[in-house]
Amino acid sequence: MSEGREEIAEGSGKGAGSGVSVGDVADAARLVGFGLQPKLLPARDAEYAELIRRHREDPAFGRLADAVAAGLGLVVLEVSPRAGMAVAAAEDSVFAVRMGDYARRAASDSGDRFLHGLAHLATAALAFPRPEDLVDDGYIGRITVHGVDAFVRQACRRLEERADEVGENTDPASDAPGLEAAWRVYTRRSATGATKDARRLASSTTGIIGKAVAFLVDSGFLQRTGDESGGTYRTTARYQLQVRDMAGSAAMAELLDLGVVPVGDGTATLVPAADDDTPLAADAGLPFHAVP
């Protein structure tokens, strides 16, 4: 820990006659710095683990570290051995990575940017399909690239059926709900495609999902566990906290309300459409039904 603890303020939480030292501030900033390294966990760094312990056991130090984070435009979601110091950037923070910025870097076409957002939404919904999954600290969600694609295509099928039932299977109005407008864009796009050297086409839906999950891995939200089904991934505590924070969004609720992912024993599956005898999607990684 830091040495030379010069006192800079009196009566700041350590008790009468004591103050916050330069070393305390340095340690608090160090803790926030650890929190900004999304792939680093306390179990892998002794100093990080000690600062997490101090934050939890020393209320004055905890308040100081939280204040440093707030000053940087960061929201502290949780401080624990499992998640470390999990922070989210407020919209005006210099650390904010806005989805629009990410999508512009990932794709130049506006339609592709729209699909990148849908890929992130679907990944979160499939990783944590039940409210209880978000509050269970021991829950680990698992997704695959092909599985997310199959999930979205089945959701698109539900939306198309719903539009047919009410006689509105036409181009959506400008004020139509986001998913109603989305299904046509997604279903028109190839699921895979390939370049001349057999690589996955970046503009295909699985290519877009692949970019989305790679971004989540780099952000410390997912961990890659294998290459099957286009890539298999497990969720992290940090991702659970982030999805918990966004779970009340209208788009997330709209997607889950389609009833595409019933869950019984903790394993998410897709509901086949009525009178659906189509074969299972190849390499979906879950019992998803293929969409013609």
Image: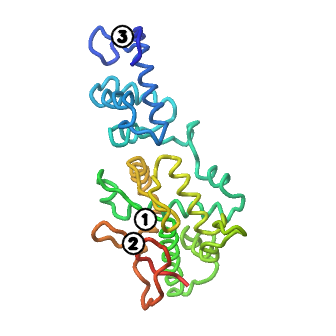
Q: Are marks 1 and 2 in contact (CB under 8 Å)?
A: yes
Q: Amino acid at mark 1?
A: Leu
Under circle 1, the secondary element is helix
Q: Which residue is mark 1?
A: 126
Q: Does residue 215 appear left or right of residue 65 in this picture? A: right
> CA gap, disc 3 to disc 2?
56 Å
Which of discs 1 and 3 lies nearer the camera? The answer is 1
Q: Name the quarter where the C terminus is drawn.
A: bottom right
Q: At which x and y percent is residue 3?
A: 41, 12
One can see residue 251 in this view: no
239 is higher (above) or lower (below) than 190: above
| Label ID, residue 140 | none
- Horizontal and vertical percent position of residue 264: 28, 71
The residue lying at 27 percent from left, 14 percent from top is: 15
- Does label 3 or label 2 sit earlier along the sequence? 3
Q: Is residue 195 left or right of residue 43?
A: right
For residue 195, which quarter of the picture? bottom right
Q: Identify the disc placed on residue 10.
A: 3
User: Residues under labels 1 and 2: Cα distance?
Assistant: 7 Å
Q: Is residue 241 above or below residue 277?
A: above
> Alpha-carbon distance for marks 1 and 3?
50 Å
Three-letter code, disc 2:
Val
Q: Amino acid at mark 3?
A: Glu
Which label's residue is closer to the chain start, 1 or 3? 3
Q: Nearer the viewer, residue 120 or 211?
A: 211
Q: Identify the residue at horizontal 53%, vertical 57% (top origin).
A: 213
Q: Which residue is mark 2?
A: 261
Residue occupying the point 27% across, 69% down: 265
Q: Secondary structure at mark 2?
A: loop
